[in-house]
Amino acid sequence: MEIAELTALLTPAGLTLLDEVGPLTTTDEAARTVSRLRAAGHSPDLVAAVVGQARLRVRATAKFGPFADRMLFTRAGLEQATRLSIAARHAGRFRAAGITTVADLGCGIGGDALGLAGLGIRVHAVDADEVTAAIAAYNLAPFGDVATVTHGRAEEADLGGVDAVWLDPARRTGGHAETRRVSSDQWSPSLDWVFALLDRMPGGVKLGPAFDREAIPDGLEAQWISADGSTIELVLWSGRLARDGVRRAALVVRGDDAWELTAPADAPDAEPHALGAFVHEPDGAVIRARLIGEVARSLEAGMLAPGIAYLTSDAPLTSPFVSSFRVREELPADTKKLSRALRERGIGTLEIKKRGVDVDPAALRTRLSLRGDASATLILTRIEGRRVALLADRVG
């Protein structure tokens, strides 16, 4: 979205037209709507803005639920926004620490600021992009004076009267549609500036889950977060927002439920264990936090192979921090023999999991020529240097 489109949209008539158009779920619907609105005499800028927002609101439902129906977005802003359920959990940590005013530096379309304002925490939001800041101001308008938005650089924000900061450095090229990742030395604001700020006041910084662990400063709590099976972010917490004795945390969120594993440091891996009745795959947040050993000990499990993030056990124990599979049998790893074995068992629906082997699951599925009504999970990995194929059933 460009300035001209936003200007056309942010009028009573433009917003009314957007509500009248409603959600557009397909390309054909969007094309017909464009033709209809242009025939009705609406300007090209307004039509582009209305149709674009109607499409984005449909996509935004996954992150913002029913709130998406009254929000505005850019495509890049939506992709990078924190989903509202996670933003609410971040806000809860600020409230629990007794913080009443937060500067959201690099607020994007306002996802995290929505979570803070929703809990009554005053938010001073800042974004360096003019269009993005205007959209954030619209999204936060229902909160009145509790949330204010400024167009400007994070480094120049006035932090007077602010209890804590929330930062989300720009890690991609500028723009509102197609963007690409940039190296960490090109982030805005820079990591050096971010870490210096967190060293002198409480705050949190949102980073990608694959952030270089060696670059995490001592004294910060590192919390990796997964949501509905995807590891989505790493947050580094400082000051009173960092919990005593916690330097590594894995927060696993599924729907409305959440579980967290914490430790004072990386946990040593469990010892290897011969293949048992169960194989467990740790959640991505647990793997990133290097807390696999903590989970293994709770499941009376060991590593299936050193350096490969699969656990195995004989005890029928499960955990919210792993996906668990009951092993049926080991099948030949050779593709032709494996295909024959799966057909003999009538398996037509197959979930393919793999670690430690160079396999393209989509290509393998095609070569297996599956037929039948039964379903199962195939786990491909290496044990003692040998490639293995384990037929299993998901149990948790």
Image: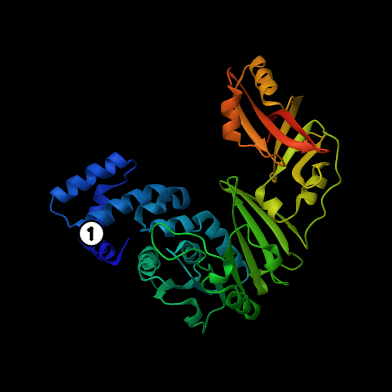
Please state the horizontal and vertical placement of residue 287, each as a whole percent of the image: 71, 51
Which residue is at the far bottom? 160
Q: Is residue 50 left or right of residue 286?
A: left
Q: Which residue corresponds to the image point at 40% horizontal and 67% vertical from the top-left?
A: 143
Location of the N terminus by quadrant is bottom left
Closer to the camera in the image, 123 or 82: 82
The residue tagged 1 is 45
**Is residue 389 visible to us here?**
yes
From this view, report whether residue 253 is shown above or below residue 315.
below
Q: Which residue corresponds to the image point at 64% horizontal and 68% vertical from the top-left?
A: 237
**Is residue 95 visible to us here?**
no
Q: Which residue corresponds to the image point at 22% horizontal and 47% vertical from the top-left?
A: 34
Closer to the camera in the image, 132 or 300: 132
Please state the horizontal and vertical placement of residue 364, each as a whole percent of the image: 61, 30
Q: Is residue 324 left or right of residue 25?
A: right
Please state the horizontal and vertical placement of residue 380, each as a whole percent of the image: 70, 34
Q: Is residue 169 left or right of residue 307?
A: left
From this view, report whether residue 362 is shown above or below residue 79.
above
Picture quadrant of residue 2 = bottom left
